Image (cartoon, rainbow, N blue to C red):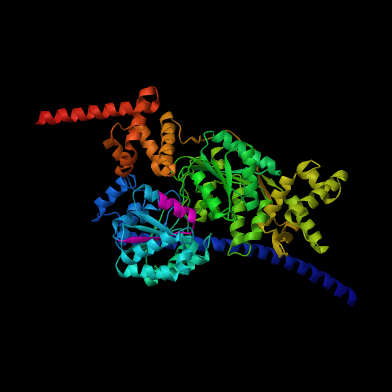
Amino acid sequence: MAEEEVALRLEAVDAELQGVQAQIAVLCDRQARLLEEQAELRQLIDCCRASEEDDIQIIEQDWSGNFEWDNEASNLLLNVFGISTFRRNQREIVNALMSNKNVVVVMAAGGGKSLCYQLPALLRPGIALVVSPLLSLIQDQVMGLAALGVSAAMLTSTTSKEEEKEIYRVLEKGDGNLRILYVTPEKIAKSKRFMSKLEKCNRAGRLSLVAIDEAHCCSQWGHDFRPDYKNLGILKKQFPKVPMIALTATATGRVQRDLQEMLQILPCERFTSSVNRPNLFYEVRDKKQVAADVIEDIALFIKETYPSNESGIVYCFSRKECEQVADALRKRQISAAHYHADMDSGLRTNVHRRWSSNQLQVIVGTVAFGMGINKPDVRFVIHHTLSKSLETYYQESGRAGRDGLPSRCVLYFRPADVPRQSCMVFSENTGLQNLYAMARYCQSKQRCRRAAFFQYFAEQVQECNGMCDTCAFENDVVEKDVTEYGKSLVQSVMDVAESDKKTTLLQLVDLWRSQLRQAGNHMSGVYGHILQSQTGDKEMSKDDAEQIILQLILDGTLREDFQHTAYATNAYVKAGSAARLILQGKRKVILEQCEKRGPVKTTLDDCAMQSGMARMLDKLRQTLAAADGGLFPYAVLSSEHIKRLSSQVPTSITELDEIIGKTKSSKYGEQIITALNEYTTKNTDDPDTKEASSSKRVATTGGQARQTKRSRNA
């Protein structure tokens, strides 16, 4: 009798233990979700605090008011830089810097960050020091400033001994008219001679300001941390009275405070612009299994959407892929070249210059290409694989459309690409968390793409206006319950673990599909039941299997486990904290699937140079650029200049001065006016010609009427 009681008690304890285990699993799942929400809320608080501090600073000082340098600034803005009006926050930033304040600027690509330090560099006496991480960007900036008649120089690994000696002499003696000096962060960190010359320049009162470009590289929390940026705090310590400006396209509240501390610019004025890029159309496309088919899709998109050879970028995961994709595009009659860090520096520079001069349509690069890119008329950015985070993707895709004209950002996504990235980022701070947020962005078939950026940067959601694939199309999206598939996958992973083996995502896909096929032949057991109840089919596609496995990883039902070999790091799939929940029927797995893509709800105007006059001006600027020492075409006339010239069609140098400024007008004015006159004479039916003629008649009539009224009053 006693034994029976003990057995009953043991059975009760076992049952209670199972209940406790289930509760623990539920609590672990809840803990994981709360930790994720906690991280998001802390990021939101960081950004809110940063925003509140900005608001307080704006109340304390109105930087949009009148200042003694206003007239000179307006004159330089138009007649040197060829810009008629300031963009958002530019005027305020210039005024703060001119008032000897330290400034942090977070401004989206295309917002005009460079002007925020270049204009004060011309307004203030002396030499401005600009620290920039990329040689190609420095070369672009120096060449562009030279075209504007601004004396600028650079100290980099490509600078000759003679040039370096002359720059050091100018820093020490103050001879010449050098206004802006560009250096890499390595120069600050490793050249004592340079720092010595800079100190002499400062003691003589000739160091006007210090600008730190791509300042997010200072912070280990930034998406592109660079160790040499940590040493830039010495600049404020050595030159405490020289105003400093730090600029970046993206930075969370945590990154902003981190870079302020590292640069030793507390307190400072902070100016943050919206992350919204309303001219960019975001789209995620399914990436096919066969590499050649993916290239075919990309080539078809480029040819059909940009038949006039508009510029674009294709980003790839590896250097090898860059070379393969560029070669495949060339075989499909698309002018393309690869760009990555393993190339000879001279070859890299040549590829970049050819692309910037519109001699190449497409540049195929790794993330080594593009930071701070200066080419404004990039019409498309294509990602051959997903980026490692939403912030990185925002930066890379943001290299399109810096001139404000419509541009496309297309990402080709396949779940099997996630482990390739996770092996690279799992050791980084929040690396996997950021990557999985990027994967959720790609997996979603319903959520606005733009809304994901607003949430990530803790910014209030704005209207998308149909400028992403989920908002532009009347898609028929369904939410499929794939819980039974999830259960079988978890069981498969556990079976592999029990046999003391390991499986990658792709290996798991093959194993699971094989199990489903075998069960489907007999339509018996758990797998046969799944096929009958959920698909009625005997075959599971690789694409669907990958989608379900990735969804289980994102939900925490499965997890990635990383192990090193002598040659690589591998990502294996194991049971996650919530695996027991799905087996016990306490969690569902829902997958979004687009059954049918409906009609377009919005129309994207892809062609930047639509009119005949605009195309004529585009060809003219390329001719003028080639004749002027190989300048980049956008340094002669910007897309905004072409837009205004096409609408106003000036007939005199005086009228042209008001559009492109006196510096450019004095260099290219006669050719531009001649070309416009010849075009309007030959193309009287052109819409731009008619519109301009009509506008001039209205303006003339209005002027005559005002003159008559003044005569009568007299």
> Residue 319 vs residue 209: left or right?
right
Residue found at x 53% / y 43% = 312
Query: 652 left or right of 298?
Result: left
In the depicted structure, whether residue 465 falls above or below residue 189 = above
What is the residue that sits farthest to the bottom in this orientation?
A: 2
Q: Quadrant of residue 419?
A: bottom right
Q: Is residue 686 magenta?
A: no
Q: Residue at x 69, y 41 (%)?
A: 292
Q: Which residues are magenta?
A: 126-143
Q: Is residue 248 left or right of residue 490?
A: left
Q: Nearer the viewer, residue 483 or 203?
A: 203
Residue 381 appears anywhere in the view: no
Work out whether residue 662 or residue 474 is closer to the camera in this orientation and state it: 662
**Residue 562 appears in the picture as rendered:** yes
Viewport quadrant of the C terminus: top left
Find residue 285 and report its horizontal and vertical position in percent.
62, 42
Find the residue positioned furthest to the front: 162
Image position of 212 with respect to 405: above or below = below
**Quadrant location, the N terminus:** bottom right
Residue 139 % position (x, y) = 45, 53
Q: Residue 75, how many percent across, how many down?
A: 27, 48
Whole-percent x, y for residue 500 in the image: 81, 64
- Could you tell me how many numbered marks the image carries? 0
Q: Quadrant of residue 305?
A: top right
Left or right position of 458 against 266: right
Q: Nearer the viewer, residue 586 or 373?
A: 373
Residue occupying image coordinates x 79% and y 62%: 497
The answer to whether residue 138 is magenta is yes
Looking at this rendering, what residue extends furthest in the left direction?
714
